[in-house]
Image: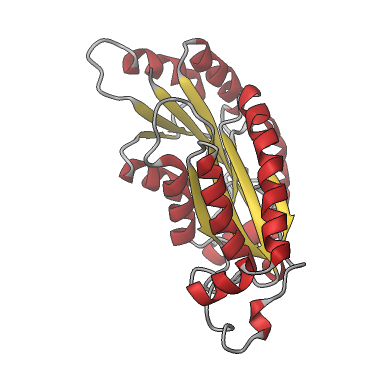
Amino acid sequence: MSEYLVVAGMSGAGRSTAAATLEDLGWFVIDNMPSALISKVSELVNGTGSEMKRVAFVVGRGGGDLDDVLPAVDSLKAGRNRVRILFLDAADDVLIRRFEGTRRRHPQEARGVEESITEERKLLSDIRDRADLVVDTGELNVNQLRTRLMEAFSGEDESGTMRSSILSFGFKYGVPTDVDLMFDCRFLPNPYWDESLRTHSGLEAPVRDYVLSRPETTEFLDHLDGLLAMLIPAYIREGKSYLTVAMGCTGGRHRSVVLSEELAVRLDAHGMPTTVFHRDIER
């Protein structure tokens, strides 16, 4: 069975970084090929003697043939291939700053950058709705985006098992928009107010012990474990490829980090391959 990934997203949201990262992971990446030809490429990939097993199509540069993307995806799925869509997104104000900072022309070539982004978002709405994984790159630098994608697409087995990703974040830096479930950890005592713990992170034993020693932490994790035990089989039955859970605290450095790491252990116990990404731990 061949594996295909369609990479789409807003211009300026990181498709070039995604393409380079996937190539480094061993994917055969085809950038800006007409979507109508995807099925033709799949015939070559699935042909006798082909050594290409993981192929990524980067689509949507300049709008072009976006209407052909989803029919091409459906055609690949009909051939019993493993097919997923990755969508890279960012808030409009972030995209505007990126284009103004680089002085690049927006591929949509509307009257201005803002109008071009609005038009592109409309054109991509159906693809975004069908995406298996949406990554909001607005708060990520290039290295963080690369790390996030490597965690999502490296070391995968071919069983099609749903994969989980846990994101810790700080509410003061903005709420992530690319997650399925979000939980607020700010009800727990904050290690920040203990001067001996302030400079440490949730990856270090003193902070971890402080957070996990609280009875409300254990109670919260136990309830969350029960909730996920109910939700995970339902998501799998619906054919979901990825489950992204966000854990937030005030600054994204202490409580949310500890709980994300602990939740990963519990998800592993449910048989789910899990990666953890700490968005704001270095802030």
Residue 156 appears in the figure: yes
In this view, 177 is above or below 25:
below
Q: Quadrant of residue 167?
A: bottom right
| Residue 63: percent from left, percent from top | 59, 35
- What colour-coding does the image apply? secondary structure
Give left or right: position of 158 versus 188: left
| Residue 249: percent from left, percent from top | 69, 67
Residue 13 appears in the figure: no
Give left or right: position of 35 versus 110: left
| Residue 148: percent from left, percent from top | 48, 52
Residue at 38 percent across and 17 percent down: it is 1
Residue at 58 percent across and 42 percent down: it is 9
Of the pair 244 and 111, the residue shown nearer to us: 244
- Give the number of callouts: 0
Of the pair 27 and 96, the residue shown nearer to us: 27
Residue that extends furthest to the left in the rendered view of this protein: 49
Of the pair 71 and 194, the residue shown nearer to us: 194
In this view, 264 is above or below 162:
below
Residue at 68 percent across and 62 percent down: it is 217
Residue that extends furthest to the right in the rendered view of this protein: 187
Quadrant assignment for the C terminus: bottom right
Give left or right: position of 119 versus 98: right
| Residue 228: percent from left, percent from top | 66, 40
In this view, 175 is above or below 67:
below
